[in-house]
Image (cartoon, rainbow, N blue to C red):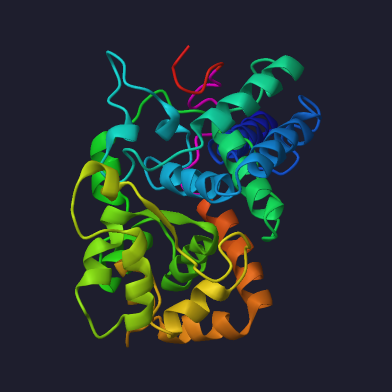
Amino acid sequence: MAHCTSSIISFIVTLLLLGAICDAQLSSTFYDNTCPDALSTIRTVIRSAVSKERRMAASLIRLHFHDCFVQGCDASILLDDSTSIESEKTALQNVNSVRGFNVIDQAKSQVEKVCPGVVSCADIVAIAARDASFAVGGPSWTVKLGRRDSTTASKSLATSDLPLFTDDLDTLISRFDKKGLTARDMVTLSGAHTIGQAQCFTFRDRIYNNASNIDAGFASTRQRGCPSLRNNDNDKKLAALDLVTPNSFDNNYFKNLIQKKGLLQTDQVLFNGGSTDSIVSEYSKNPTTFKSDFAAAMIKMGDIEPLTGSAGIIRKICSSIN
């Protein structure tokens, strides 16, 4: 009987251990012992990059978003084309648009000098988004760490899962829901557009179509920087998504939407007589609520299907599998 009891206890302990291994969790203290200088090293690189180019803050936040929406937060977006990989960088939603790869590479290079082979590119992308937000007056948050890097990428998933600038509200809500994010999370995360920029081809139709949901004066102002003639040079002309305070992380983005001054269709559909109008109104009046919700939504987004434990690898170079 004692032998049977001992065997049962041993079996239960084994199950518990296996369960703990399978349920590997991200932790804010993940690198405290293995690379205690990781966070400060990354922060220095991000601060320097944003001080040189304010727009980089929005780009780094967007990079994290575009990574997490494809295969989870696994740094798959950083991989270049190779014989075995079709890069996500060439997907319609990313090509000539997603940027900041060089900043992540710089951060990775500096971290490798401090503790080689320890910190994942996926974690660096997550940390960079937080540090970029804080560098332009946005919220900070505690980044959970322990992600590992993917050995694969998926251009097809990037094409199917990432939002398009032509999406309507229901499509946007559906895309976010598939990733475990609510409509409120979607509106909150869209608020990062307060420091972003867009290329002319993404908003040309909106500013020239005389629609009822765009302020005429706003459209006229935007037309000056985005000619109606479609060509490569005109298509790439940039405009700030927030005309009022384009360099500050604030709630003006939501105030703009209420005034029908959303630059992209996917901006204005958030306040266009639909189910998210009340959220936009709330954030337009309560910047503190917006910032706290944004931090929470970024943490939630960073939890999308991370590779942990023995899954994935730690890449030495973020753009390739070593």
Q: Is residue 119 left or right of residue 165?
A: right
For the point 70% across and 51% down, which residue is it? Answer: 135
Say whether residue 70 is magenta: no
Q: Position of residue 274 (x, y in %)?
A: 32, 84
Residue 29: tell me if it is visible: yes
Q: Position of residue 124 (x, y in %)?
A: 61, 34
Q: State the extent of the magenta-drawn residues as a range.
A: 303-315
For the point 72% across and 15% down, which residue is it? Answer: 113
Snapshot quadrant of residue 43: top right
Quadrant, the N terminus: top right
Residue 215: tell me if it is visible: no
Q: Position of residue 237 (x, y in %)?
A: 35, 50
The front one of 267 and 260 is 260
**In this picture, is 133 found above or below 28?**
below
For the point 53% across and 17% down, which residue is it? Answer: 317
Say whether residue 307 is magenta: yes
Q: How many marks?
A: 0
Q: Is residue 220 left or right of residue 78?
A: left
Snapshot quadrant of residue 109: top right
Dominant SS of magenta comes to loop
The front one of 78 and 231 is 231
**In this picture, is 37 found above or below 56?**
above
Q: Position of residue 311 (x, y in %)?
A: 49, 27
